[in-house]
Amino acid sequence: MTGIFSPVEPNHDAGKLKPGVVGLFTAEIAAHEMQPQSRVNLIAGVGIEGDRYAKKEGRWSDRPKPEHQLTLIAAEVLEDISLELGIEFTARECRRNIVTSGIELNNLVGKIVKIGESAVILATKPNHPCRYLERLIDKPVMESLLGRSGLNCEILRGGIVNIGDQIVEVTEEWRSDC
């Protein structure tokens, strides 16, 4: 489990969150505004229940790939880009499904990760930003997102994910470990 978490020592006694989920977002169809959720249902091999990709109504639904099932981005990246560009770049605007905190997401590529009590995902590859996002939100964020635009993931085992859930790397034997 070393290497995936930011070098931040969470202080559990002070009520700080452990590394994990700080935001959840879905959109019913392509180009619609992302809606914040307090919990989502991940469906293995499909996506998030009610989300555009699970419904096959997303921007890339005509070219389905397992890594289009779920996306993650770090809250720290959104904060950094907002400061760098002098604009507000929100979790809703980034169009990722899960916003994390305290985790070096790029270190998860190729790893199996458990989110919450039962959901298990494979972090398949880094997400690559595109001009489509800039056109939707009318903000010049693409260049700043290069190399830190989050992850594209495949859902291996479904489950409910809530704000505040922990994210932990699991072994290859995840079917019996979780």
Image: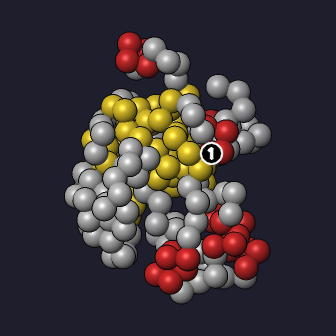
Residue 172 percent coordinates (x, y): 50, 18
From the top left corner, tell me how far across and down residue 11 is, in percent: 68, 38
Q: Is residue 22 left or right of residue 104?
A: left
Q: Is residue 135 left or right of residue 161?
A: right
Say which residue appears at 25% left-offset and 59% top-offset: 56
Which residue shows up at 38% across the image and 48% down it? 65
Can the viewer see residue 35? no
Quadrant of the image containing the C terminus? top left
The image shows residue 45, relative to residue 2, as above or below, that is below
Residue 13 or residue 163, whichever sits in front = 163
Q: Quadrant of residue 28?
A: bottom left
Image coords of residue 98 (percent x, y): 46, 53
The residue beneath circle 1 is 105
The image shows residue 143, relative to residue 149, as above or below, that is below
Q: Secondary structure at mark 1?
A: helix
Name the outermost residue toward the front: 63
